[in-house]
């Protein structure tokens, strides 16, 4: 079942067989949020996508150091104001309070979406000395210059030396040379419009500032990821990820800085997630078309007609490949809700042990078909983490699970070993890799199932004692909370109404 993992590398624009630098180990860096306001659903999509990638790599047995940073300085707005300073101004807080407040909010949301924490979550403001050192190295290598206390990356010299600027974003040098999009006020200090600041002298009113050999100032936004990825993953590591809106200028400049400082590019595989759209347009704060996760969970978004709980929203996100755009619509959410319920029902059947008794002691005629479906799920995941294809293969598995439940004759055509395999693999993908939990439960659905089996057992006892009033009370009370019991000669089953 171990097919070879292929990853689409943004650098080469090709799917490549994934070979880590060190066998069995992976260093992975993903650009984290700028914590000056609440994350929106678009941000969440990117982090959920990387979570599934991380979980699948873990499942494949790799030891991974997953680093995802927190940007809390240097990311400037179009008008040149630092995003953190703007957050502080609007919320009337210290910039560090702003960073803490929205970092906490981000963590809460990541927990709600049941994503795993990275191994290291470094903050830009906690790594100012490392960034200053990197600026110095780039200066020492002659690829940056100082002007009025700021330090700029010299793109023309870099292009002359390495002839590679623009490789990641696919932009031709002429395009790149028009402007650097770094939103700096002092554009006239640059030798060339495409140069970008790696250290910025703070103006009088700028509140986030540190001493450096060049001025009291702050680092350029792109620098933090170069410095922190090098510190925690080394000069070259395996995977660097982020949303595809970060390809230029952020990632392009990161590559330039790493090459400028130590002579080679940081990552071997660059992975970029595609955008969550609303009415065909990228969901973004600056466009003013964001939906917050809370709005969607509470049914308070003007764009979506009703409330959707987190796991259904997550399931909706997983139904598009990470490199495809995804439009958030009522129809797509309803489809996700229906599919989520099918998965939950299948999980219930698996946990109920009903089918296990019917499966065969010997090799069953359906075994081969089942194994093929499971192989297809792995192949889909190994093909650049094709989660939607894996989900559609899992629907095949669900169809087998349902037939087993409805038809003991069908179930007897599957061996006990293969039925066990169905149960194990279903749970591995649904819970461990996609990270879906039963809605409203912090555990994995097995607790609910266990509790329901206990209630069914107790009801059986009262029925045997012919205590019909107690039996009806149990059934009616469950109905009130949305759970229906169905009695048949095989026993009692439960399901959501
Ligand atoms: P920011 O806080 O703006 O730096 O963004 C954090 C992450 O969210 C980055 O990796 C962005 O690429 C990603 N992102 C921003 N908007 C969207 C969107 N609409 N869909 C998917 N990812 C997004
Ligand atoms: Zn970054």
Image (cartoon, rainbow, N blue to C red):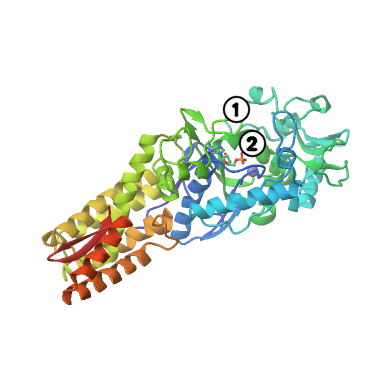
- Between 383 and 19, the residue placed more toward the observer is 383
x then y, percent, for residue 240:
58, 46
Mark 1 neighbour density, 10 Å: few (under 14) some (14–19) many (20 or more) = some
Asked whether residue 139 appears in the rendered view, the answer is yes
Residue in the picture at 22% in, 62% down: 493
Among the two numbered marks 1 and 2 on one chain, the one whose residue lies closer to the N terminus:
1
User: Compared with residue 77, is residue 491 higher up or lower down, i.e. above or below?
Assistant: below
Is ligand 2 less than 8 Å from the beta carbon at label 2? no
- The count of marks equals 2
Kindly state the secondary structure of the residue where label 2 is placed. Answer: helix
- Residue ID for mark 1: 171
User: Compared with residue 355, is residue 389 higher up or lower down, i.e. above or below?
Assistant: above
Ligand 1 quadrant in view: top right
Residue in the picture at 69% in, 48% down: 99
- Between 77 and 384, the residue placed more toward the observer is 77
Circle number at residue 212: none
Asked whether residue 420 appears in the rendered view, the answer is no
Occupied quadrant, residue 241: top right
- Between 438 and 410, the residue placed more toward the observer is 438
User: Compared with residue 364, is residue 19 higher up or lower down, i.e. above or below?
Assistant: above
Occupied quadrant, residue 338: top left
Label 1, label 2: how far apart the Cα atoms are? 10 Å
Circle number at residue 252: 2
Mark 2 neighbour density, 10 Å: few (under 14) some (14–19) many (20 or more) = many
- Between 434 and 240, the residue placed more toward the observer is 434
Is ligand 1 less than 8 Å from the beta carbon at label 1? no
Judge left or right: residue 34 versus residue 493.
right
Confirm or deny contact between disc 1 and disc 2 (CB under 8 A): yes
Residue in the picture at 33% in, 63% down: 424
Kindly state the secondary structure of the residue where label 1 is placed. Answer: loop
């Amino acid at each position: 079942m171990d097919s070879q993992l292929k990853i689409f590398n943004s650098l080469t624009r090709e799917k490549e067989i994934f070979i880590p630098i060190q066998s069995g180990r992976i260093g992975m860096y993903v650009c984290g949020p700028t914590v000056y306001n609440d994350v929106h659903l678009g941000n969440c999509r990117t982090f959920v996508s990387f979570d599934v990638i991380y979980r699948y790599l873990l499942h494949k047995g790799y030891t991974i150091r997953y680093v995802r940073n927190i940007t809390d300085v240097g990311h400037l707005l179009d008008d040149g104001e630092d995003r953190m300073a703007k957050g502080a101004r609007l919320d009337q807080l210290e910039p560090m309070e702003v960073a803490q407040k929205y970092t906490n909010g981000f963590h809460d949301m990541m927990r709600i979406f049941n994503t795993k924490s990275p191994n290291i979550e470094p903050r830009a403001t906690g790594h100012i000395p490392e960034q200053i050192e990197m600026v110095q190295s780039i200066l020492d290598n002659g690829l940056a210059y100082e002007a009025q206390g700021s330090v700029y990356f010299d793109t023309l010299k870099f292009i002359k030396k390495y002839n590679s600027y623009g490789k990641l974003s696919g932009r031709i040098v002429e395009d790149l040379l028009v402007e650097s999009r770094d939103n700096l006020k002092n554009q006239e200090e640059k030798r060339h419009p495409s140069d970008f600041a790696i250290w910025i002298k703070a103006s009088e009113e700028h509140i986030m500032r540190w001493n450096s050999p060049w001025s009291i100032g702050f680092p350029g936004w792109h620098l933090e990821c170069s410095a922190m990825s090098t510190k925690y993953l080394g000069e070259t590591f395996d995977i660097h990820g982020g949303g595809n809106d970060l390809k230029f200028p952020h990632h392009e400049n990161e590559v330039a800085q790493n090459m400028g400082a130590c002579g080679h590019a940081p990552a071997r595989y660059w992975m970029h997630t595609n955008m969550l759209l609303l009415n065909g347009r990228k969901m973004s704060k600056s466009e003013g078309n964001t939906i917050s996760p809370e709005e969607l969970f509470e049914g308070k978004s003007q764009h979506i007609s009703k409330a959707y709980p987190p796991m259904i929203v997550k399931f909706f996100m997983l139904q598009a490949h990470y490199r495809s755009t995804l439009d958030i619509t009522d129809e797509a959410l309803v489809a996700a809700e229906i599919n989520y319920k099918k998965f939950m029902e299948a999980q219930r059947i698996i946990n109920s042990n009903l089918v296990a008794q019917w499966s065969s002691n010997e090799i069953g005629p359906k075994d081969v078909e089942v194994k093929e479906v499971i192989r297809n799920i792995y192949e889909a995941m190994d093909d650049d983490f094709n989660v939607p294809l894996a989900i559609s293969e899992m629907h095949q598995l669900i169809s087998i699970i349902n037939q087993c439940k409805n038809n003991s004759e069908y179930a007897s055509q599957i061996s006990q070993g293969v039925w066990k395999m169905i149960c194990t693999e279903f749970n591995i993908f649904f819970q461990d890799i996609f990270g879906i939990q039963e809605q409203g439960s912090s555990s994995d659905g097995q607790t609910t199932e266990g509790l329901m089996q206990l209630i069914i057992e107790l009801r059986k006892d009262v029925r045997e004692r012919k205590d019909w009033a107690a039996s009806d009370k149990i059934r009616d009370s469950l109905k009130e909370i949305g759970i229906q019991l169905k009695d048949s000669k095989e026993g009692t089953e439960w399901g959501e109404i």
